[in-house]
C-alpha cells in the first residue's frame, strides 16, 4: 500500500520578475519538474541531491507545506491540494527540520514533546502516556525533566523526533535533519529513526547529502535539477557512479573502495555496501587467486 503517490508534480516558487537588459521578463526555473514516485507504507526512503536539486522542496510537499503547481500528490490517499484535508495530512506526516533549536519551544523536554498534543486537545492522562512512550522510544526518557538547552545537538534532534512521534504519525520526513550535527549526533538520530522504522513500521523519508546515511535505506531517489534522475536500492544506485557524479555526489567510502579494487582487477562482486561485506569479498577473492 502506498502512503505517498506522486504523479508528475511540478513546482515553481513565486518570484517577482524584473525585465532584463533586453526588455524580456526573467525566466523562472522550476524547483520541481514532472516528479513521479511512490512510497510504500513502512519503507525507509532516502532522497539524495546537491543543494538546489529540489530535494528540500520535495520534502515540503510531503506534508503539504507546499502544494504542486501542476500534477497531483496523494498522501495516505488524500490529495495535498484539498485544503479540508490539511490537518489530517500533517497528522499523518511529521516533519523534522535541519536546526532542532527552531523546533524546540518548551523550557523542559517533556513539556516540549507535549506541546502538539495540548494544541489538539488530547486529554492530560493520554498526553502523559504518549510523551513518556515517545521519549522512551527515542532513548532520552532520562532527560524528560531537563532543559533542552543542556542537551547535545543529537539529543535535541531526538526531542524533535519524539514530539512528532507523540502525534502518532504514519510517516516521518527528515529534511537535512543531521546537517548541523557532529558524526556522533548524526549516528544517534539515524539509529533512532531506523529503530522506529523497523520496530514500529513507521515510514521514514530522509533528505540528505550524507551518502553513508543512504546505505540503510530500502530505496533511494537521486535528484538533479528538480527531477528524479535515478532510483533503486542502495546496491543498484551506488553502481551508477556516472549518474552520481552528474548529481554532484560521491560514492560512500566502502563502495568507492570496492569500485577501486574491481578496477585493479580484484574479483569483488557488485552491491557491496558494508565493511563486513567488503572484507568477506576480499578474503574470497584472495583465496580464489591462491587456488
Image (spheres, rainbow, N blue to C red):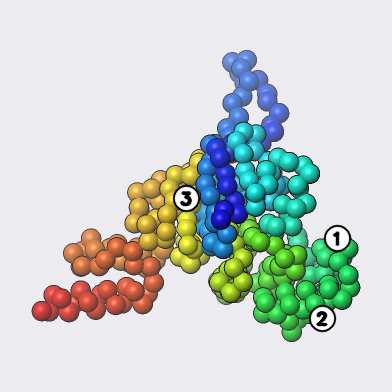
Residue on which disc 3 sits: 222
Label 1 Cα neighbours within 10 Å, binned few <14 / some 14-19 / many ≥20: few
Q: Using the image, tell me which numbered label, if any, was put on residue 290.
A: none
Can you say which quadrant of the picture contains the C terminus? Answer: bottom left
For mark 3, give the secondary structure: strand
Q: Where is residue 256 drawn, in percent x and y?
A: 35, 63
Q: Quadrant of residue 144?
A: bottom right
Q: Quadrant of residue 120?
A: bottom right
The answer to whether residue 147 is visible is no
Q: Nearer the viewer, residue 266 or 119?
A: 119
For mark 1, give the secondary structure: loop
Residue on which disc 1 sits: 120
User: Disc 2 or 3, which lies upstream in sequence?
Assistant: 2
The residue mark sitting in front, 1 or 2, is: 1
The answer to whether residue 35 is visible is yes
Q: Is residue 187 left or right of residue 80?
A: left
Residue 237's place in the image compared with 159, above or below, is: above
Q: Residue at x 71, y 47 (%)?
A: 65
Q: Where is residue 122 drawn, in percent x and y?
A: 86, 66
Kindly indicate whether the residue at mark 3 contacts the one at mark 2 (C-beta within 8 angstroms).
Answer: no
Q: Where is residue 233 drawn, in percent x and y?
A: 42, 59
User: Disc 1 or 2, which lies upstream in sequence?
Assistant: 1
For mark 2, give the secondary structure: loop
Label 2 Cα neighbours within 10 Å, binned few <14 / some 14-19 / many ≥20: few
Q: Residue at x 87, y 76 (%)?
A: 125
Q: Where is residue 206 drawn, in percent x and y?
A: 57, 59
Q: Using the image, tell me which numbered label, if any, was put on residue 145.
A: 2
User: Disc 3 or 1, which lies upstream in sequence?
Assistant: 1
Amino acid at each position: 500500500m502506498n502512503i505517498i503517490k506522486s504523479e508528475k508534480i511540478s513546482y515553481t516558487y513565486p518570484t517577482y520578475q524584473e525585465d532584463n537588459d533586453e526588455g524580456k521578463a526573467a525566466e523562472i526555473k522550476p524547483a520541481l519538474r514532472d516528479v513521479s514516485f511512490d512510497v510504500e507504507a513502512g519503507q525507509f526512503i532516502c532522497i539524495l541531491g546537491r543543494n538546489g536539486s529540489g530535494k528540500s522542496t520535495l520534502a515540503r510537499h510531503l506534508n503539504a507545506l507546499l502544494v504542486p503547481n501542476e500534477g497531483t500528490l496523494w498522501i495516505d490517499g488524500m490529495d495535498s491540494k484539498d485544503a479540508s484535508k490539511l490537518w489530517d495530512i500533517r497528522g499523518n506526516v511529521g516533519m523534522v527540520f535541519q536546526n532542532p533549536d527552531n523546533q524546540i519551544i518548551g523550557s523542559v523536554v517533556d513539556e516540549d514533546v507535549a506541546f502538539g498534543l495540548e494544541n489538539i486537545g488530547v486529554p492530560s492522562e493520554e498526553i502523559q502516556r504518549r510523551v513518556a512512550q515517545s521519549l522512551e522510544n527515542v532513548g532520552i526518557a532520562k532527560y524528560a525533566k531537563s532543559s533542552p538547552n543542556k542537551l547535545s545537538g543529537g539529543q535535541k534532534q531526538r526531542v524533535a523526533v519524539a514530539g512528532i512521534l507523540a502525534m502518532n504519525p504514519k510517516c516521518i520526513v527528515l529534511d537535512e535533519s543531521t546537517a548541523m550535527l557532529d558524526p556522533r549526533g548524526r549516528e544517534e538520530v539515524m539509529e533512532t529513526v531506523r529503530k522506529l522504522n523497523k520496530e514500529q513500521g513507521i515510514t521514514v523519508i530522509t533528505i540528505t547529502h550524507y551518502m553513508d546515511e543512504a546505505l540503510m535505506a530500502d530505496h533511494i531517489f537521486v535528484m538533479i535539477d528538480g527531477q528524479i534522475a535515478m532510483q533503486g536500492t542502495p546496491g543498484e544506485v551506488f553502481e551508477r557512479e556516472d549518474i552520481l557524479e552528474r548529481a554532484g555526489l560521491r560514492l560512500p567510502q566502502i563502495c568507492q573502495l570496492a569500485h577501486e579494487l574491481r578496477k585493479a582487477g580484484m574479483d569483488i562482486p557488485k552491491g557491496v555496501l558494508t565493511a563486513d561485506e567488503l572484507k568477506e569479498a576480499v578474503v574470497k577473492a584472495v583465496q580464489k587467486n591462491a587456488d
